[in-house]
Amino acid sequence: MNSLKEKIIFITGASSGIGKSCAYVFAQKGANLVISARRKNLIDEVADDISKKFGVKIYAGKVDVTKRMDVIGFVNSLPGEFKNIDILINNAGLARGLNKFYEDNPDGWEEMIDTNVKGLLYVTHAILPGMIERKFGHIINIGSIAGHEAYPKGAVYCASKHAVDAITRSLRMDIIDKNILVSTIDAGLVETNFSKIRFNGDEEKAKNVYKGLTPLTGDDIANAVVYCATRPPHVNIAEITLLAARQASATISYRADD
Ligand code: 8X3
């Protein structure tokens, strides 16, 4: 099995949700971390807490993945002991709105495409040359069930996650001779602040998404990411799809009051 001890893991969007869970679970396994998010105070808090609890090496930075020059600047300025990234977890992503396409706000489209697609591309493109040089690496993308299915009112979010799926598969072909693995972890209903962000802070609407069933947690996803990252060297997990136990698809769930 590949051990995580002394490995350097770079996690984007690590100040909350699945990214934060990944940071804790990987640190618990002895990995050293580079974590980034847009909010400096939050990412610093996560870093301090992890460093106290697990004593691993951790470097935190403010990075907006939608800004290509920010991403490049951050990666180029990593201190020497954090430069050789072994595993990249492309987690930063969001949904904005759940509306019929013709009633939807294009500002949200820009945000989703810039973060979920272009952000993932910028970060991957900045990290890959080092992995290629060292002939070692693993890129793990946090996709979604929305990368496999399109659902009503989700045209642009679903398109962005279909793009993540296509990028994952195409990239795997491009680097097949480089000893670098590419995987995607695609989840359904995970209760984080995802829905609160999607509904612009509307707590009631956000809660309703998970009503009548037990959703997945950030830790459930982080554990799948760890599984993926710790297989024997001859194994590549191309894709893991996780659904809540009462979820059959993006649109079909069995709820307590059904
Ligand atoms: C999140 C899952 O079903 O809301 O990516 O699109 S879903």
Image (spheres, helix red, strand yellow):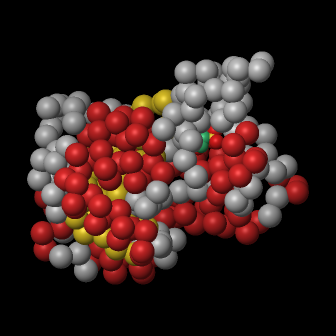
Q: Residue furthest right?
A: 103
Figure check: 38 above or below 173: below
Q: Nearer the viewer, residue 235 or 248?
A: 248
Q: Can you see residue 55? A: yes
Query: In which quarter of the view is residue 91 placed?
Result: bottom left
| Residue 115, percent from left and from top | 55, 63
| Residue 183, percent from left and from top | 37, 41
Q: Nearer the viewer, residue 196 or 179?
A: 196
**Screen quadrant of the N terminus:** top left
Figure label count: 0
**Screen quadrant of the C terminus:** top right
Ligand 1 is in which quadrant of the figure?
Answer: top right
Q: Residue at x 75, y 48 (%)?
A: 204
**Left or right placement of residue 188 versus residue 84 in this view:** right
Q: Can you see residue 138? A: no
Q: Residue at x 63, y 66 (%)?
A: 111
Q: Nearer the viewer, residue 140 or 220?
A: 220
Figure check: 24 above or below 214: below
Query: In which quarter of the view is residue 61 placed?
Result: bottom left
Q: Nearer the viewer, residue 248 or 203?
A: 203
**Left or right placement of residue 88 versus residue 155 in this view:** left
| Residue 92, percent from left and from top | 48, 58
| Residue 127, percent from left and from top | 29, 64
Figure check: 70 above or below 45: below
Q: Residue at x 51, y 71 (%)?
A: 66
Query: In which quarter of the view is residue 29 placed?
Result: top left
Q: Residue at x 55, y 21 (%)?
A: 245
